[in-house]
Image (cartoon, rainbow, N blue to C red):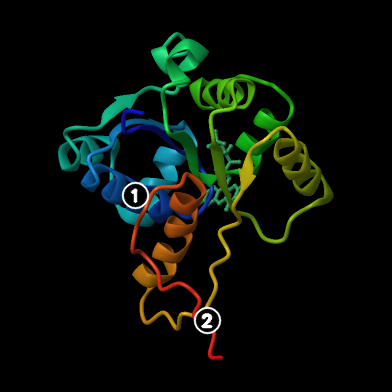
Amino acid sequence: MAKKAVLCITGASGSIYGYRLLEVLDGMGFNLDLIVSTAGAVVLKEELGLSLKDIQQRFPRVRLVSEKAIADSVASGSRLINYTGVLVAPCSMSTLACVANGINQNLIHRVCETALKERVPLVLIVREAPYSLIHLENMLKVARAGATILPASPAFYHKPKSVEEIVDFIVGKALDNLRIEHNLYKRWKSQD
Ligand SMILES: Cc1cc2nc3c(=O)[nH]c(=O)nc-3n(C[C@H](O)[C@H](O)[C@H](O)COP(=O)(O)O)c2cc1C
């Protein structure tokens, strides 16, 4: 299968997860389609000080697609079927709710819906604290439909020494889920 993936960045806190996935997957030679929601762009600017123009300049190979481009190729199952997977990092509770309930208000929701119906791996790096019953029910719905819910809740048994190492644990987990080999975090080694 060609090294192709869709990466979506939505308006939850944690744009750094999406940014790091961009760095890692682009570095691995993946052809990336990047969709950033309107709120995602606001949080990206707030948290990392980066505009979409900055992102395109830093990653010229990445295909930046508007969330409004509802007729884009990745909206179609006949195209998405050839992708390794779809990642939403970070995934807001609003985007989660749309995906869980089959509501397509932008291209991100549609790509997620298409991934679920075509059984293309879908990983949602969700972030909110605490979760309401509605959030939990929506997570259950999408998990039952085949998505992977990957909470942005890193482990600490690998004794991270920086924010980067904490972020890489979650990014590594997302790649594990897509069966993409990497060395982003130290795997658990039993003492016995
Ligand atoms: C600085 C900032 C941080 C936010 N953090 C979160 C968050 O962690 N989780 C969440 O679900 N929404 C968060 N929001 C709210 C979402 O951005 C908002 O619900 C938005 O409508 C989501 O739209 P989207 O899913 O299309 O990106 C945050 C908003 C701002 C401005």
For residue 30, side relative to residue 189 (left or right): left
Tell me the number on the disc at residue 37.
none
Residue type, numbered disc 2: Tyr
Q: Residue at x 39, y 52 (%)?
A: 46
Q: Quadrant of the C terminus?
A: bottom right
Q: Earlier in the sequence, mark 2 or mark 1?
A: 1
Q: Which residue is mark 2?
A: 157
Q: Residue at x 59, y 43 (%)?
A: 92
Q: How far apart are the two marked residues, 2 and 1, measured between alpha carbons?
A: 24 Å
Q: Which residue is mark 1?
A: 19
Residue type, numbered disc 1: Tyr
Where on the picture, by quarter, is residue 131? bottom right
For residue 50, side relative to residue 75 (left or right): left
Q: Position of residue 3 (x, y in %)?
A: 31, 33
Nearest to the observer: residue 36 or residue 28: 28
For residue 140, side relative to residue 19 (left or right): right
